[in-house]
Image (tube, rainbow, N blue to C red):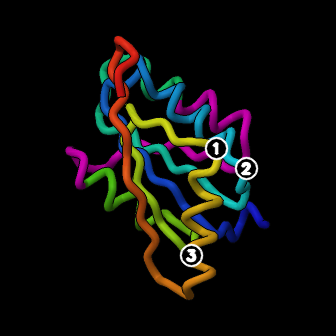
Amino acid sequence: MSVDNPEVTLIVPARDSSAYLGKCIESVLKQKYTDWELIIINDNSVDDTPSIAVSYAEGEPRIYAYDSPGSGVSSARNYGMRLARGRYIGFLDADDSVDPDYLSVLVGNAHEENADISQCSFCLLYRDGRK
């Protein structure tokens, strides 16, 4: 594992996401697989999204916070891809959270199958607890 050469880059475009960005970042920090970098791209937020991203980046060398040079989620993702250093690139939305085994399973499958792409399903969690 190397901070300069991670296996996985996760890119999170974030616009006015202060209500849930912290939960997303915390779920990445809880990954059992640790060879990753997290790039958060602030997409012209007017709330506390940029300060939340920067506060995590200041405390964790695998997290980076940037401001998007353009506008819109596609521009933010493309900017993140230009900054990415990982062999594998993944995308999360700022309101996503992932299980602690998320990266272990995806990277493990890619290695086991000698694959360039590994994918997974998702589960919607509603505020009332329904899945």
Task: Judge the density around disc 1: few (<14), some (14-19), many (≥20) Cα neighbours within 10 Å.
Answer: some
- Mark 3 Cα shell of 10 Å, populated few (<14), some (14-19), many (≥20): few
Q: Nearer the viewer, residue 131 or 9?
A: 131
Query: Which residue is identified by label 3?
Result: 87
Specify the farthest residue to the bottom: 114
The residue singled out by tag 1 in the image is 100
Q: CA distance from mark 1 to mark 3?
A: 20 Å
Secondary structure, mark 3, is loop
Helix, strand, or loop for circle 1? Answer: loop
Alpha carbons under labels 2 and 1: distance apart:
6 Å
Q: Is residue 6 left or right of residue 54?
A: right
Residue 24 vs residue 70, the one in the foreground: 24
Amino acid type, callout 3: Arg
- Specify the quadrant of the image occupied by residue 29: top right
Instruction: Determine which of the numbered discs, if any, sits on residue 32 in the image.
Output: 2
Is tag 2's residue or tag 3's residue first in the polypeptide sequence?
Answer: 2
Residue 94's place in the image compared with 9, above or below, is above
Measuring from the top left, give residue 95's x and y in whole percent: 38, 31
Q: Residue at x 54, y 61 (%)?
A: 9
Whether 18 is drawn above or below 82: the answer is above
Tell me the residue at 42%/59% (across/down).
120
Q: Secondary structure at mark 2?
A: loop
Q: Is residue 3 above or below residue 118?
A: above
Residue 70 belongs to the span the image colors magenta: yes
Crowding near pointer 2: few (<14 within 10 Å), some, many (20+)? some
Magenta residues, start to end: 53-74
Query: How many numbered discs, if any?
Result: 3
Q: Which image quarter holds the C terminus? A: top left
Is label 2 in contact with label 1 (beta carbons under 8 Å)? yes
